[in-house]
Amino acid sequence: MFRAAVMDGFGKPIRIMDFEKPILERGSVWLQTVFSEVCGTDVHLYHGRLAGVPYPIIPGHINVGRVAELNGEVKDVDGNLLVPGDMVTFMDVHETCHNCWYCLVAKASTRCPSRKVYGITYGVQDGILGGWSEYIYLKPGVKIVKLPQRISPKAFIGAGCGLPTAFHAIEQANIRLGDTVVIQGSGPVGLNAAILAQLVGALKVIVVGGPQHRLSIAEDFGVDTVINIETVNHEERIRIVRELTAGRGADVVIEATGVPGAVPEGMSLTRDAGTYVVVGQYTDNGDVSLNPHMDINKKHLTVKGTWGIDLSHFYRSVKVMEKYSERFAWEKLISKHYSLSDINQALADVENQTVMKAVIDPYSV
Ligand SMILES: [Zn+2]
Ligand SMILES: [Zn+2]
């Protein structure tokens, strides 16, 4: 027997339940959870804001754990044979078909209708497929990545799902060596985007966000300028960014706020013929008005959206972390550790933004 946290949906408190260890299919792995996280998506899940969620579910989509047991030969993405005791992570998205129109013609597997996500679109009835649990069942074919020695489990979960999400946005942004990049938002996605923007060659990175403690982390991560939205108003924010870019605006702006009103402002922060990437509007937070002539057409603006990740973003994120683990202290993104029985508090703290990253340690009491 072991314990897992179950979410019934639509604002019902999370329950801790006892489960029995399942029978391991050939090619599956029984993972002992080391850390999971609470991210903004889990808050959306709690409020029933995501479509196609088969409640009750065991949340927790980005996880790190130790191989407890496996059935047969199981290899990680690099072809390493896994053995009990290995510290690993795994790609939360599973069952992408690589056989449908979106996968093969559009080459946009994040829009594959078959894809399932651990902790989100797998329900309790499908198995122990979420990380708010003492153990996680890795189905045959789940993409596992052995955690490199240089990455501590704590740093890995500090980066959390914000890193691969930001990776996808940065890939879409096509930042060029010497560009000025504005990141709107200083949550986990925004701060990871600020790290990656530097790594792909941005000369100047400006983070527009808040509160101050998040902006201080941005500065620790090497961001050149931070603008606190709590003390600097809309007009001032535009004026400051223009001043830092010879009056033009930034070459690339990445939205990572979740606030619809940030979008027209982000377009204003982008230079003519620049690129604007929207990654923060993960759920439907409402409409916003913009002027298509001024904001897009005449401005010659490229606008891109990214939603979700594929294996390339996840895998490369791990490799980037391995290389830059000393330069960027990802564990700084962690505000607090919670036990399974504190999960309702963890969700509330993430929702109220009293913490940046809430880490779940299922074995702490
Ligand atoms: Zn497909
Ligand atoms: Zn997440």
Image (cartoon, grey):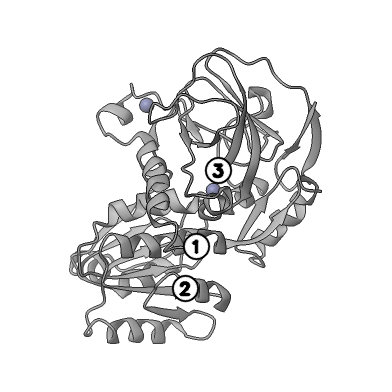
Give the distance between the C-alpha atoms of the residues marked 1 and 3, in whole angstroms.
Answer: 18 Å
**Residue at the image position 24 percent from the left and 29 percent from the top:** 105
Q: Is residue 53 above or below residue 14?
A: above
Label 2 crowding class (10 Å Cα cut-off): few <14, some 14-19, many 20+? some
At label 2, which amino acid type do we have? Asp
Residue nearer the viewer, 159 or 83: 83
Instruction: Look at mark 2 in the image and give the residue it sits on.
Output: 220
> Looking at the picture, how far across and down is residue 227, in whole percent?
44, 80
Estimate the spatial distance between the alpha carbons at disc 2 and disc 3, rounded to whole Å: 24 Å
Q: What amino acid is at disc 1?
A: Ala
Question: Going 63% across and 35% down the picture, which residue do you hit?
Answer: 130
Residue 119 visible at all? no
Q: Are marks 1 and 2 in contact (CB under 8 Å)?
A: yes
Query: Would you say the beta carbon of the disc 3 residue lies within 8 angstroms of ligand 2?
Result: yes
Residue tagged 3: 62
As drawn, the label of residue 329 is 1
* Mark whose residue sits in front, 1 or 3: 1
- Camera-nearest label, 2 or 3: 2
On the picture, is 174 further left or further right than 149? left
The residue at the point 59 percent across, 47 percent down is 49
Q: Quadrant of ligand 1?
A: top left
Indicate the secondary structure of the residue bearing disc 3.
loop
